[in-house]
Amino acid sequence: MPASRRTILIISQVYPPDAAAVGQHFHDVAAALVKRGRPVRVITSARGYDDATQTYPARETRDGVEIRRLPLSSFGKASIPVRLLAQMLFLVQAIAHGLFTPNLGSLFVSTSPPMCAAGALVVRALRRVPLTYWVMDVNPDQVIELGKMKADALPCKVMRVFQRAVLKRAKDVIVLDRFMGERISRMRDVHEKLSVIPPWAHDDVLESIEHDQNPFRDEHNLQGKFVVMYSGNHGYSTPVTTLLDAAVRLKERDDVVFAFIGGGVGKEDVRRTISEHNPGNIIDLPYQPLESIKYSLSAADLHVVTVGPDVVGVVHPCKVYGAMAVARPILLVAPDPCHVSDLIQAHDIGWHVAHADVDACVRAIETAIEAGESRRREMGASAKGAVDGDLHSTASIARVCDVIEQGLPDAPSPTQRPSAAPAHEHAA
């Protein structure tokens, strides 16, 4: 088979229809590669990442992408040992599939699960194909910074060894922001093969819906309310406790509603707050279907993005792009500086407060209300302009595809396609 038809193999524990953002971004790239004429096969889990009771077909084709889903590779998020067991079982199965994938041309792998790239290294070595490494979070840094393990723990030391090996042997490394690039390069200097490409909003399914035309606001009795929304993963690295405390402080205001939409371990904080304080101003909802997410995101007047105190450069706050795509201002609860604080300063699209500063959080929300609809629309328009410009999905997906293709035997020459953005670009 000619080189142009060699298969690109993607290994990711999550993939659509699972709602996790990592899988959605992988599919965007995979579908774009198929449009470029490249066969793409995805190895993923047969069960939901957040909800292991969700099951998906063992084999499926989506937008021309061949999908193989593996059993015994997701048991939910009940505990770290359970998650590690699922990751290891997924890894063993993924290696076997990688070794026997016919006409394999290259590997594209991320950090879900964290040791996924280590499995790809085995396939790379035995099949002698190039590997592109898409860093969406940094481990073992994440578990260390969150206090889940100590830096000198054996699993962390092993993971660090594998990370350095992957960074050394990968053809190219893609990170999501400048802070992540700096952290990765402290682990191993990869500046010569590093591309900084922020992720993107799913602007093909996102648009700003006016409140009076929004069925989501009707369904949840939000008409006439100022809606403060957190939508996405409620994780250890994205704590919502400061926002919850602010909601309790403001529970006497019948014009303000706090909507917590999504899943993750942090949902326990939401439910505990509701149970203990019985605030009538908090609603707790699961992830919304991708096809209707434009309604839920547009229902907000103010979107909240959180970044844990010690995880700048470790994780990337992808949820900010969805909020920007529906033209809403941002309330950031995070350290300074970070990627979203860069965006807020560059585009004048919101407010920034520190974790645990509940007074400042309440003041920021009240300031957003007092700013008036005209000012909020102005900030939202600026946010939308940013995601329609340098952060637009079409351009960002193309850059990722360019990185995957560059250096392959049949890759277009540099004069035939735009090169991937250098590491110093695309940092807001």
Image: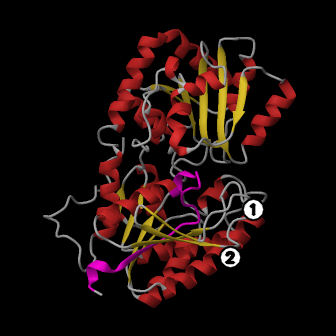
Residue 186 percent across, percent down from the top left = 47, 62
Q: Amino acid at mark 1?
A: Ile
Which of the image's four quarters has the N terminus? Answer: bottom left
Q: Which residues are magenta?
A: 2-23
Q: CA distance from mark 1 to mark 2?
A: 14 Å
Q: Nearer the viewer, mark 1 or mark 2?
A: 2
Q: Is residue 188 magenta?
A: no
Q: Is 7 above or below relative to 198?
A: below
Residue 246 shown left or right of residue 341 in the figure: right
Name the residue carrying label 2: 89
Residue 367 shown left or right of residue 238 in the figure: left
**Residue 366 visible at all:** yes
* Residue reaching furthest to the left: 415
Q: Is 246 above or below relative to 411?
A: above
Task: Compare marks 1 and 2 and give the one earlier in the sequence.
Answer: 1
Q: Amino acid at mark 2?
A: Leu
Name the residue carrying label 1: 80
**Residue 153 visible at all:** no
Disc 1 element: helix
Q: Dot 2: few (<14), some (14–19), or many (≥20) neighbours within 10 Å?
A: some
